[in-house]
């Protein structure tokens, strides 16, 4: 089911208002929080109201799906900044680095090496985030907290990836604040500035814990099929 354009525009305005409020409450500037509008499963019709409102930062979790809808929109709006927030298989790295501006899901050595090679071949790199599996969930992507420092070091110092920050997806059944605090601690001790954390249900809390990037889908675009 597609959410009507007017509803998407109203949801977007409401989320922007909530971000401003949460930032003010945390004593932070609202422009220190970047809204990554997660448009997965939604088509260009749902995305356009945000573009019309001047929004340019979007997130997708599948390379294949993003390749079907974003090249045309990026041609129309060259300042779009597209973030990959889902798992990246090494055989899709070439396509991903050609389309995305930011890869938030760098989560293993094999992928880090493939990205490093692809950036060298292109002569241009995407900003990278290291995904941390803060809940150590077996089914979830991301490096374990205990391995994070070494992995960040490998990516940054040996492979020369432009590592800008960390990303996490807390376990659904746990208090997210613990995970936000842990991600921030790992970022701080590694001198990383950006924290991608917080989704529709918990982005205000993530802002209180220092999120610089929140990834919000359903609160803007409605439910997914
Ligand atoms: C889908 C998704 C989101 C957005 O989730 P909502 O709850 O719809 O806001 C955020 N981050 C990742 C990694 C996702 O896959």
Image (cartoon, rainbow, N blue to C red):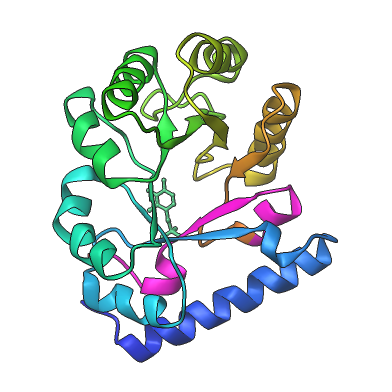
Question: Which image quadrant is residue 159 in?
Answer: top left
Question: Which image quadrant is residue 196 in?
Answer: top right
Tell me: residue 107, above or below residue 78. above
The boundaries of the magenta stretch are 204-224
In the image, what residue occupies the spot 68% across and 64% down? 31
Q: Quadrant where the N terminus lies?
A: bottom left
Residue 213 magenta: yes
Please name whichever residue, 224 or 6, is drawn nearer the observer in this view of the structure: 6
Left or right: 169 in relation to 187: left
Left or right: 79 in relation to 165: left
In the image, what residue occupies the spot 20% across and 58% down? 71
In the image, what residue occupies the spot 46% across and 71% down? 55
Tell me: residue 196, above or below residue 49. above
Please name whichever residue, 81 or 89, is drawn nearer the observer in this view of the structure: 81
Percent across and percent down for residue 128 are 47, 33
In the image, what residue occupies the spot 47% across and 23% down? 161
Residue 9 magenta: no
Question: Which image quadrant is residue 45 in?
Answer: bottom left
Percent across and percent down for residue 57 are 45, 60
- The residue furthest bottom is 6
Left or right: 207 in relation to 150: right
- The residue furthest right is 27
Percent across and percent down for residue 151 are 52, 14
Residue 175 visible in the displayed image: no
Q: Quadrant where the C terminus lies?
A: bottom left
Tell me: residue 100, above or below residue 166. below
């Amino acid at each position: 089911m597609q959410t009507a354009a007017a509803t998407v525009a109203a949801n977007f305005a409401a989320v922007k208002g909530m971000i401003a409020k949460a930032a003010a409450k945390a004593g932070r500037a609202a422009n220190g929080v970047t809204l990554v509008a997660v448009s997965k499963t939604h088509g260009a019709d749902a995305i356009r109201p945000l573009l019309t409102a001047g929004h340019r930062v979007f997130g997708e979790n599948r390379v294949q799906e993003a390749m079907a809808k974003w090249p045309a929109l990026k041609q129309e709006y060259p300042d779009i900044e597209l973030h990959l927030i889902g798992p990246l298989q090494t055989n899709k790295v070439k396509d991903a680095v050609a389309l995305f501006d930011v890869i938030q899901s760098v989560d293993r050595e094999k992928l880090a090496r493939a990205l490093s090679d692809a950036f060298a071949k292109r002569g241009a790199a995407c900003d990278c985030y290291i995904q941390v599996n803060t809940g150590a969930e077996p089914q979830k992507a991301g490096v374990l907290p205990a391995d994070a420092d070494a992995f960040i070091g490998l990516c940054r110092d040996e492979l020369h990836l432009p590592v800008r920050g960390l990303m996490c997806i807390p376990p659904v059944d746990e208090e997210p604040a613990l995970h936000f605090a842990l991600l921030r601690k790992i970022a701080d001790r590694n001198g990383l500035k950006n924290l991608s954390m917080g989704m529709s249900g918990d982005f205000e809390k993530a802002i209180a814990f220092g999120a610089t990037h929140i990834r919000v889908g359903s609160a803007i675009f409605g439910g997914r099929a």
